[in-house]
Image (spheres, coloured by chain):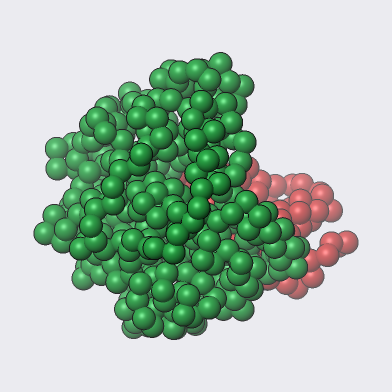
Chain colours: A red, B green
């Protein structure tokens, strides 16, 4: 895997950041200090696995298997999302 | 009726506060303890808010932890599924109480700081020892692992140290800092000549924030709100009136923004008579300036009307006597020259503190 997130890093949503089922609007949102983010469905699938239990490598494996998507492309998407959220202090490694 | 759904609710649980900051966003007419809503009513409001679509609840005041039931209220809000944010002075808040709040489901703490210089900080807060307390509370929040945002209100007495405050917040372990210039209505307006910085000070502060941002982000996230008295265009106040937010006062009046009671003639509904949904959809105060139909010129034909929504209704009313006119912070407002004159006017060192016992500040000229 050619990404800058270490394969054995364990990404997790930071304390005070969580996914929430917004039943009123019928969508899943990410709630964080002073922010409400509405990620797209594939981003939500990645974020659901950012619990600190799985390594980055295992998250990509799991998603590739579940959705039958090429591993290489999934790794790039997951890395982009996670790095963006690290910069916004919503995900820790 | 409206298709809009609110995202946030600001719950002013009480107007009691150990501090007396002269820029307080509370109204000049403060609600007394005997007027405050009881626990059950607040819990009902939180349930109604979640059903209406509110996602984030801001537990504020006054000092929200002055409420004996703050832990119970936080637990109820968390059980309703709301993201809970405590906006506190940090004074009188023990680590034990913070632990109980965290256990009850508190998601985030916003703590106000007045300055990096302890004597100046205590003077602005109107309370000796406040600065030390606040730093102890910051430490306790970080030790508990709760995300911490430091809130700083900028004015003439602390603007020279804006970068120092960001560095101090970073060193204290804050994840975010909100640096906002004073809003000049209510108490802030009464203290404008004491608090309004000069144009040179504002420019220096912009540069200082830009520099420190390069150095520290994303080690700390910096949310900087520029002052509207020095801009060409007004702020997009509340991201539009009645569009995203509700505010409930200690006695249960529901407002489109925390300063809305300063607009004479608006009719506010209360949680005693109506559900939150009825108030959001149909109350006269929420309907008054929702959308763009209410606008007059120069707003009505302005290409920016969906960007800044005509600015702040409270500021428009304070300056022009008509809340439907353009915000005088906009250079297209006929009152903009008068606002610029206020920026150029002499300053004073006299502070009117925000206290129940303070003489009520005289209304604007």
Residue at the spot 44% in from the left edge and 48% down from the top edge: B184
Measured as percent of width and height from the top left, residue B76 is found at: 28, 60
In this image, B81 relative to B341: left or right?
Answer: left
Residue B188 horizontal/vertical position (percent):
40, 53
Counting every numbered tag in the picture gives 0
Q: Is residue B244 rendered to the left or right of residue B361?
A: right
- Give the image quarter of residue B268: top left
Identify which residue, B240 or A20, lies in the foreground. Answer: B240
Question: Which of the image's four quarters has the N terminus of chain B?
Answer: top left
The residue at the far front in this view is B346
On the question of residue B297 being in view, the answer is yes
Residue placed furthest toward the right: A2
B238 vs B279, nearest the viewer:
B238
Looking at the image, which residue is at 32% across and 53% down?
A: B26
Closer to the camera, B200 or B16? B200
- Looking at the image, is B160 positioned above or below residue B303? below
Location of residue B228 by image quarter: top right
Can I make out residue A18 in this image? no
Q: In which quarter of the image is residue A89?
A: bottom right
The answer to whether B33 is drawn above or below residue B49 in the figure is below
Residue at 40% of width from left, 25% of height from top?
A: B324
Q: Quadrant of the C terminus of chain B?
A: top left
Is B57 situated left or right of B249 in this image?
Answer: right
Image height of B223 relative to B270, above or below: below
Q: Where is residue B166 in the image (x, y as percent from the top left)?
A: 61, 69
Comparing B76 with B110, the one in front is: B110
Image coords of residue A56 (percent x, y): 72, 65
Residue in the image at 45% along x and 18% along y: B296
């Amino acid at each position: 895997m050619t990404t800058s997130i270490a394969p054995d890093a364990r990404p997790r949503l930071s304390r005070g950041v969580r996914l929430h089922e917004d039943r009123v609007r019928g969508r899943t949102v990410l709630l964080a200090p002073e922010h409400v983010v509405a990620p797209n469905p594939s981003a939500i699938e990645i974020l659901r696995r950012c619990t600190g239990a799985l390594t980055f490598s295992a998250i990509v494996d799991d998603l590739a298997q579940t959705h039958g998507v090429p591993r290489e492309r999934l790794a790039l998407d997951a890395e982009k999302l996670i790095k963006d959220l690290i910069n916004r202090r919503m995900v820790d490694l | 009726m409206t298709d809009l759904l609110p995202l946030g609710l600001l719950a002013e649980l009480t107007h009691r506060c150990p501090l007396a900051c002269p820029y307080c966003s509370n109204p000049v007419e403060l609600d007394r303890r005997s007027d405050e809503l009881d626990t059950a009513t607040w819990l009902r409001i939180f349930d109604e808010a979640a059903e209406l679509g509110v996602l984030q609840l801001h537990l504020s005041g006054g000092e929200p932890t002055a409420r004996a039931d703050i832990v119970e209220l936080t637990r109820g809000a968390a059980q309703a599924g709301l993201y809970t944010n405590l906006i506190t002075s940090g004074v009188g808040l023990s680590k034990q109480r913070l632990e109980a709040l965290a256990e009850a489901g508190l998601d985030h703490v916003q703590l106000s700081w007045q300055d990096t210089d302890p004597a100046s900080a205590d003077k602005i807060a109107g309370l000796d020892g406040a600065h030390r307390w606040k730093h102890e509370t910051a430490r306790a929040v970080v030790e508990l692992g709760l995300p911490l945002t430091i809130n700083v209100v900028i004015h003439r007495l602390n603007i020279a140290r804006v970068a120092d405050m960001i560095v101090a917040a970073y060193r204290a372990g804050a994840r975010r800092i909100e640096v906002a210039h004073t809003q000049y209505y209510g108490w802030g307006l009464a203290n404008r000549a004491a608090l309004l910085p000069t144009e040179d000070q504002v420019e220096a502060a912009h540069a200082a924030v830009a520099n420190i941002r390069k150095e520290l982000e994303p080690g700390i996230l910096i949310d900087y709100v520029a002052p509207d008295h020095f801009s060409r265009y007004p702020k997009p106040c509340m991201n539009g009136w009645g569009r995203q937010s509700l505010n409930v006062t200690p006695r249960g009046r529901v407002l489109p923004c925390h300063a809305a009671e300063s607009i004479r003639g608006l009719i506010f509904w209360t949680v005693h008579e109506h559900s939150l949904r009825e108030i959001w959809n149909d109350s006269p105060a929420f309907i008054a300036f929702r959308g763009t139909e209410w606008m007059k010129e120069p707003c009505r034909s302005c290409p920016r009307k969906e960007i800044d929504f005509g600015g702040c209704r409270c500021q428009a009313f304070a300056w022009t006597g008509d809340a439907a006119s353009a915000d005088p912070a906009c250079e297209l407002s006929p009152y903009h020259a008068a606002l610029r004159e206020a920026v150029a006017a002499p300053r004073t060192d006299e502070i009117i503190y925000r206290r129940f016992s303070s003489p009520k500040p005289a209304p604007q000229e």
